[in-house]
Amino acid sequence: MNSTNATLARNTKVMNRFDLTSRLVAKLKNEEAVIGGIGNTNFDLWAAGHRPQNFYMLGSMGLAFPIALGVALAQPDRRIFALEGDGSLLMQLGSLSTIATLKPKNLTMVVMDNGIYQITGAQPTPGAAVADIVAIAVASGLANSSWAADEDDFERLIEESMSAAGPTLIGVRIDDKPGTGATRRDPVQIRERFMHGMGVREPL
Amino acid sequence: MAVAEEKTSPEASEKSWHGIVLQTLKRNDIRLIPYVPDRVLTPLIRNLHADPFFTTFATAREEEAVGIVSGAWMAGMRSAVLMQTSGFATLANVLASLAIPYQIPLIMFVSERGTLGEFNYGQSLVCRTMRPVLDSLAMEHHTATRIDEFEFIVDRSIKQAITTQAPVALILSPLLTGGKVFDK
């Protein structure tokens, strides 16, 4: 994390992805779906304890929010969480406007912002020193977007999102630590188990 | 031809290529239609928007639409994506990393530009990448050229995609749609 970004992200504590993911998962009591993006966001989701309602994306960088939007549209009565990195989101900023237009009220998006491509060698993202992800989200039409000041604030924002009247985006500044554990890279099983978790299929 | 079809009555349009697409989607319970627009697709997009059976909306990029329909499929809703040839050219990564390995029945309608009267050299070049990409991934694809075969191709391809859990690309040739022509 460079100092310029720290200035931009004002008053926000630098937290840890695995700790925040574990806090989120601990709150899930109603078979909520969780979509983990490429790399560390889904590694930490896996490490926080596999649930059938978790989906782990193994490629297609930037598509965690679009995938979550599809789940949210298909099952409007289920709460959907999506975990995405700042570098991934920069690849698909247009998806924020699509989500703002469709306004799914059952979608909570979390952006894990460390300002780096941690997994490829911690190179800074093009936005690291200049861009504010939450400001981008607000300008994209997602009015209910905010930075979490610390862990307690993150938990409060997660709770609030569960009864929000529209989609919620939560930005969290995180450290430069790698993901904890590694997802079993079996896309067919991941998809099939997720469909069981979504209640649209029974096991053979 | 395509322009003339846009002005026909709803009854007549059921026998147009876009009427066939709309009715066949509906018959197969395909409700969610994200798209990146194309001139030739305009009457189809307009009629999908007008029909409350469908949830139809624009996305900023084609791969975003593929992500959305992948999520919708896994949560029990059937979908299809509309795009132009140049949009298909942005999809190699998401096809190879999401749709195919996760066995998503991704149904794509691709309005074919770049051939049979193309006036933009870039479009004709990008069109040549489409079938090699589809073939390199061993993806099912059909090029629809004739209205009398079209309903059969669309209906069977949708059913095959869903039952075999594999993507399909339906390429809408200018021979079917009239294509986009140079008008100064």
Image (cartoon, coloured by chain):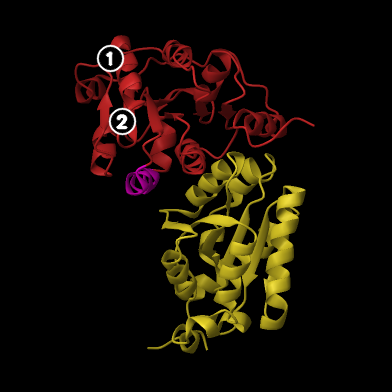
Chain colours: A red, B yellow
Quarter containing the N terminus of chain A: top left
Identified at 57% across, 13% down, the residue is: A47
Q: Position of residue B87 (x, y in %)?
A: 51, 60
Magenta span = A93-103
Left or right: where does residue A90 sit relative to residue B94? left
Q: Is residue A152 above or below residue A97?
A: above
Mark 2 Cα within 10 Å, few/some/many (few <14, many 20+)?
A: some
Q: Nearer the viewer, residue B11 or A24?
A: B11
**Residue A96 in magenta?**
yes
Q: Amino acid at mark 2?
A: Ala
Q: Is residue A43 above or below residue A58?
A: above
Q: Residue furthest right?
A: A204
User: How far apart are the two marked residues, 1 and 2, measured between alpha carbons?
Assistant: 16 Å
**Mark 2 = which residue?**
A164
Q: Position of residue A182 (x, y in %)?
A: 61, 18
Badge 2 marks a residue whose secondary structure is loop
* Badges 1 and 2, same chain: yes
The disc placed on residue A195 is none
Q: Amino acid at mark 1?
A: Asp
Identified at 33% across, 26% down, the residue is: A161
Q: Decide whether the magenta segment is chiefly helix, strand or loop.
A: helix
Q: Position of residue A40 (x, y in %)?
A: 51, 22
**Mark 1 = which residue?**
A153
Q: Is residue A162 above or below residue A102?
A: above
Identified at 43% across, 12% down, the residue is: A23
Chain identifier of the residue bearing label 1 in the image: A
